[in-house]
Amino acid sequence: MRALVTGGAGFIGSNVVDALIERGDEVHVLDDLSTGRQQNLDGALASGAGLTEGSIADRATVDRVLGEFKPETIFHLAAQIDVRRSVADPAFDAGVNVVGTINLLESARDHDVARVVFSSTGGAIYGEASVIPTPESALPLPEAPYGQAKLAAEGYLGLFERLYGMSTVSLRYGNVYGPRQDPLGEAGVIAIFCGRALAGERPTVYGDGTQTRDYVHVDDVVAANLAAAGSNVTGAINIGTGHETTVLTLVDALAPHAAGDFTPAFEPPRLGELPRSALDVSRAGEALGWKASVSIEQGLPATLDWARTAG
């Protein structure tokens, strides 16, 4: 398979790239390297993958890459992922996450791409859901422009299916964690906590720490992407574990491995933070034959080990 991975130098994208290379696919990456790291692709580039530095917001670049590489499948992971920036500058967020997706879809149609697998978001789209674990049928109630933009992008994938018969699928991730997630900047709490643990620093917990998330390991997310690419399933599919894990559970699990005092430093709750979030993953099992296989008990120590080695 000839696969284009947008955002392929990022945390999730580079793991997708490695899996594609490992199974013998021909891979090209489009990434503007604003948050992704070229070093994440060192092994893939050495194995023959290609890289174009550019943005999905630039239609000419997108057209050039698709015209030259002629992918059969696109894994679309490029995105503006900083929720805080989406609130401060929603037009910029939409320019990347909505217009960038439209650029990709238009070019994919022009170049006869067979399948588009879109990386979307679960919690940020559903907002404060009335049903937990939350199914795909729940009313979307985004609480930040980031979630609203991802929902709009999903809508365009559906539109291109109806108008042009394109084959697309949207994977709504839980809170993804694992190797290559940056502990600095707009990162997941597990990466941040791993960074604090290795530095001998205490973790900051906002609120009382009982808020829950559905933490899914990046290896499982990669497997979901490969399964989705090999299927003809369309629409939105939740990708998570279906289980809630509290922030304090993460603290307790990492504490024995910390380089110093790892008792939490409590701060006031952040505005708009969801009290609970978990995804109903029934459709992923039925439609893709996929199920998360890495438990939080397995994934946390392995992620910390990676962070220790990478550091």
Image (cartoon, rainbow, N blue to C red):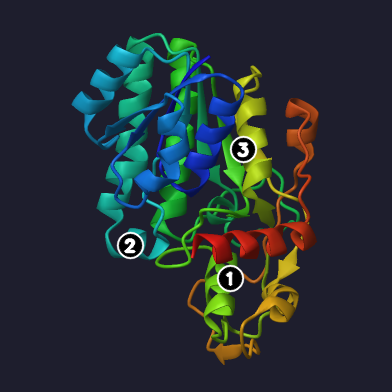
Element type at marker 3? helix
3 and 1 marks in contact (CB < 8 Å): no
Instruction: Provide residue 134's location: percent of width, then percent of height.
Output: 71, 51
Of mark 1 and mark 2, the one earlier in the sequence is 2
Q: Which residue is mark 2?
A: 85
307 vs 78: above or below: below
Number of other residues with Cα within 10 Å of mark 2, as a class: few under 14, some 14 to 19, many 20 or more:
some
Q: Residue drawn 39% across and 55% down?
A: 145
Q: Which residue is mark 3?
A: 222
Q: Nearer the viewer, residue 258 or 281?
A: 258
Of mark 3 and mark 1, the one earlier in the sequence is 1
Left or right of 12 on screen, residue 233:
right
In 3D space, how far apart are the residues under numbered discs 1 and 2 (Cα atoms)?
24 Å
- Disc 3 marks a residue whose amino acid type is Val
Instruction: Provide residue 200's location: percent of width, then percent of height.
Output: 56, 84
- Disc 1 marks a residue whose amino acid type is Cys
Number of other residues with Cα within 10 Å of mark 3, as a class: few under 14, some 14 to 19, many 20 or more:
many
Q: Point out the frontmost of discs 3 and 1.
A: 1
In 3D space, how far apart are the residues under numbered discs 2 and 3 (Cα atoms)?
26 Å
Q: Quadrant of residue 289?
A: top right
Q: Residue drawn 58% across and 90% down?
A: 266
Q: Residue drawn 65% across and 85% down?
A: 208
- Disc 2 marks a residue whose amino acid type is Arg
Number of other residues with Cα within 10 Å of mark 1, as a class: few under 14, some 14 to 19, many 20 or more:
many
Q: Quadrant of residue 52?
A: top left
Q: Nearer the viewer, residue 48 or 143?
A: 48
Q: Which mark is drawn over residue 194?
A: 1
Q: Point out the frontmost of discs 2 and 3.
A: 3
Instruction: Provide residue 50's location: percent of width, then percent of height.
Output: 36, 26
